[in-house]
C-alpha cells in the first residue's frame, strides 16, 4: 500500500534526496496526528489506490486490497447507524439551506434559468416567455403573444403550481401547498370562462401560497412570488420521457435516480420514484425508498441515453456552482438524444421528514456515511460491493 513517505519520495527532485530523514517522516507524523485527533480517517484515506478500475478487471492482488478496504468500510458504516441519509437531510441539510443567504435562488424557477444560462449557455431548459407579479397583468393581449400550440404557466416560488395550456384550453396538472395543512388547489375551469380569466384566478391562488414552512424548508419563504409563462417541450406521445435526478454529496455525483413516466402531457410532474443507478457506469444497484414506490424493470427505464455523458457534465457544472453539501440536479430526457433542465432541489422528497430510508438499509447507512464524512475518498464501485 502506498504511504505518505513513498509519495513524497517519488516527487522529490534528485538533488534534494539527501535531505534529513526527518523531512521524509514529517508528512507521515502529521497524518498520524490528524488521525489521532479524529480529523481524518486513516482507514478511509488509504483504503485503496485511486486508480482502481471496476473489480471485474482487477488482478488478484488488487482485488484482495479492495475487498479488505470494503470490509473496513462496512465496519465504519455499522458504527454510524445513528445517522442515516434521511436523518442527515432532515436535521442538518434543511437548517443549513434555510440559513443560507443565497442558496434559495437556485430553487426559484425563474432565477435558476438565468443562473444556469450564465454558467453554460449550451445547457437546455424550457424557454421563458415572461413572468408577472400580479394577476391583473395577465391579459388577452399578453396571451396572444404565446405559441398557439401551447405554453405553461407555473408558480416560481413553490413546489407545484403548474398549468398546461393547449389549443387555448388550460388544465391544472399540479397542486400547490401553503403553510400548514390547508391545500391551496388549482381552480377548476368554469363553463364559459375565458382562458385569460381562468389564468388570472389561478395565478392569484398561486401568488398567495406560502410553501415550505410546515416542512422546515424555510428557504422557499425567501422567494419572490411570481407566475411564469414558458414553452412546452416538444415531447411526443410516443417519446420515452424519463426524469434523471443526479444526487451530489460533498461535490461528488454519488448516484442518479431514473424515474419513468407514461404520461408526457404531465411532463413537469414527478413520476413514481424508480431505480437508483450508479454513476458513471449506469449499473442498477436495486435500491429504492420506502413508501408508495415501485422498482421498474430495466426495460421500463430504458437504455442509457446517448447524451448521458453530456447530462452528467451539465449536472456537475450546476452542482459545483451551487456549492452545498447536498444538492439534487434534475433533467428531463426524451427521444434518447434530447434533454432539458428541470430543477435544483436541496431536500430530496423533503427528506421524508427524517423518517424514511433507502432500502435495503445498507444503502441508507452508506449514503449517510458518505454524506457525513466529506474526508472519505469516494469510489463509485464501493456501493456495489456492500
Image (cartoon, rainbow, N blue to C red):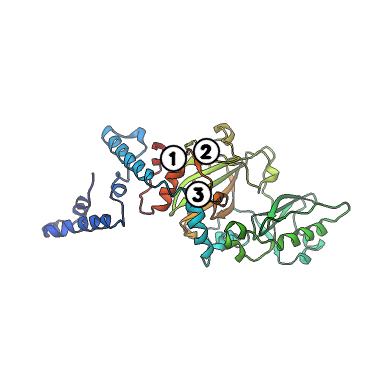
Q: Is residue 322 left or right of residue 48?
A: right
Q: Is residue 178 above or below residue 266?
A: below
Q: Is residue 317 visible?
A: no
Q: In the rendered image, which quarter contains the N terminus?
A: top left
Which residue ends up furthest to the right in the rendered image? 192
Tell which circle, 3 or 2, labels the residue nearer the N-terminal end. 3
Residues at circles 3 and 1 in contact by the CB criterion of under 8 Å: no
Q: Nearer the viewer, mark 2 or mark 1?
A: 1
**Label 1 residue SS:** helix
Tell which circle, 2 or 1, labels the residue nearer the N-terminal end. 2
Residue 198 found in image quarter: bottom right
Q: For the residues marked 3 and 1, what is the alpha-carbon distance in whole angstroms? A: 13 Å
- Label at residue 278: none
- Label at residue 86: 3
**Label 2 residue SS:** loop
Residue that mark 2 sits on:
304
Q: Nearer the viewer, residue 9 or 295?
A: 295
**Label 3 residue SS:** helix
Q: Nearer the viewer, residue 384 or 218?
A: 218
Please tell me how crowded label 3 is: few (under 14), some (14-19), or many (20+) other residues with Cα within 10 Å.
many
Residue that mark 1 sits on:
362
Amino acid at each position: 500500500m502506498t504511504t505518505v513517505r513513498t509519495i513524497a519520495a517519488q516527487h522529490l527532485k534528485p538533488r534534494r534526496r539527501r535531505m534529513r530523514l526527518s523531512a521524509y517522516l514529517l508528512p507521515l507524523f502529521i497524518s498520524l496526528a490528524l488521525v489521532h485527533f479524529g480529523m481524518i480517517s486513516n482507514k478511509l484515506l488509504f483504503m485503496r489506490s485511486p486508480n482502481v478500475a471496476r473489480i471485474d478487471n482487477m488482478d488478484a492482488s488488487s482485488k484482495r486490497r479492495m475487498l479488505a478496504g470494503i470490509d473496513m468500510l462496512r465496519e465504519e458504516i455499522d458504527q454510524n447507524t445513528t445517522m442515516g441519509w434521511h436523518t442527515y437531510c432532515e436535521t442538518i441539510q434543511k437548517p443549513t439551506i434555510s440559513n443560507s443567504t443565497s442558496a434559495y435562488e437556485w430553487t426559484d424557477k425563474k432565477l435558476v434559468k438565468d443562473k444556469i444560462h450564465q454558467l453554460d449557455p449550451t445547457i437546455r431548459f424550457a424557454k421563458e416567455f415572461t413572468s408577472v407579479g400580479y394577476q391583473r397583468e395577465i391579459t388577452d393581449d399578453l396571451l396572444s403573444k404565446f405559441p398557439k400550440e401551447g405554453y405553461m404557466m407555473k408558480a416560481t416560488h413553490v413546489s407545484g403550481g403548474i398549468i398546461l395550456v393547449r389549443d387555448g384550453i388550460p388544465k391544472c396538472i399540479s397542486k400547490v401547498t401553503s403553510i400548514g395543512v390547508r391545500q391551496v388547489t388549482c381552480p377548476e375551469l368554469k363553463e364559459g370562462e375565458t382562458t385569460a380569466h381562468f389564468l388570472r384566478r389561478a395565478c392569484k391562488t398561486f401568488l398567495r401560497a406560502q410553501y415550505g414552512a410546515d416542512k422546515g424548508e424555510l428557504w422557499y419563504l425567501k422567494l419572490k412570488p411570481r407566475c411564469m409563462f414558458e414553452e412546452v417541450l416538444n415531447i411526443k406521445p410516443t417519446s420515452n420521457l424519463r426524469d434523471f435526478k443526479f444526487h451530489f454529496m460533498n461535490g461528488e455525483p454519488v448516484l442518479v435516480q431514473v424515474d419513468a413516466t407514461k404520461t408526457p402531457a404531465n411532463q413537469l410532474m414527478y413520476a413514481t420514484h424508480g431505480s437508483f443507478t450508479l454513476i458513471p457506469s449506469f449499473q442498477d444497484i436495486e435500491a429504492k425508498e420506502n413508501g408508495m414506490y415501485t422498482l421498474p424493470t430495466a426495460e421500463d427505464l430504458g437504455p442509457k441515453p446517448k447524451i448521458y455523458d453530456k447530462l452528467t457534465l451539465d449536472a456537475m457544472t450546476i452542482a459545483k456552482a451551487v456549492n452545498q453539501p447536498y444538492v439534487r440536479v434534475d433533467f428531463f430526457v426524451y427521444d434518447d438524444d434530447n434533454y432539458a433542465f428541470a430543477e435544483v432541489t436541496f431536500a430530496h422528497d423533503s427528506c421524508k421528514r427524517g423518517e424514511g430510508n433507502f432500502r435495503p438499509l445498507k444503502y441508507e447507512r452508506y449514503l449517510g456515511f458518505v454524506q457525513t464524512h466529506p474526508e472519505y475518498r469516494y469510489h463509485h464501485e464501493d456501493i456495489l460491493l456492500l
